[in-house]
Image (cartoon, rainbow, N blue to C red):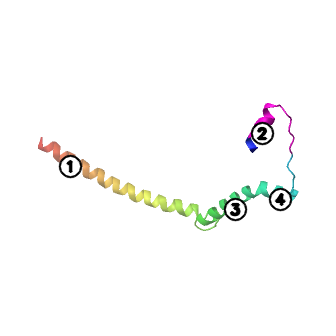
Amino acid sequence: MKRWLCGLTLFLASTPVWAQTESRDSPLMAVLFTWAPVLVLVGFWLFFMRKIGWTSKAGGYREYMRVSQEKLALIEGHLAEIASSLKTIAEKERGRD
């Protein structure tokens, strides 16, 4: 008799079936399996934070922000030049009309 057919027969006959798995794991293994994913995630987080330098005294996030501020000032200068060029072009176009 097939396995699923036996289960169906027991279900239709309303036969109570009690099953319990045998626990072979020690409490230490249960704790390890419970906390292992959390510890792995924390480990990756610390690794990447050190890699980008958030925990270092020199550089790190502050250095990144300083470079970003310098780039922002450079971009603002270029935008000012573009705006003045566009104003000059617009004035010349008005003079032609």
Mark 2 is surrounded, within 10 Å at the Cα level, by few (under 14), some (14 to 19) or many (20 or more) other residues, namely few
Mark 2 or 1: in front is 2
Q: Which residue is mark 3?
A: 43
The numbered mark at residue 89 is: 1
**Residue 86: x percent and y percent?**
25, 49
Determine the secondary structure under disc 1.
Answer: helix
Would residue 84 be found to the left or right of residue 62 on screen? Answer: left
Name which of mark 4 and mark 2 comes first in the sequence. Answer: 2
Estimate the spatial distance between the alpha carbons at disc 4 and disc 2, rounded to whole Å. Answer: 33 Å
Q: Residue furthest front?
A: 1
- The label on residue 29 is 4
Which amino acid, mark 3? Answer: Gly
Residue 7 tag number: 2
The residue range painted magenta reads 5-19
Q: Residues within 10 Å of mark 3 (few under 14, many from 20)?
A: few
Q: Is residue 19 above or below residue 59?
A: above
Name the residue: 54% across, 64% down.
63
Which of the image's four quarters has the N terminus?
Answer: top right
Q: Earlier in the sequence, mark 2 or mark 1?
A: 2
Q: Nearer the viewer, mark 4 or mark 2?
A: 2
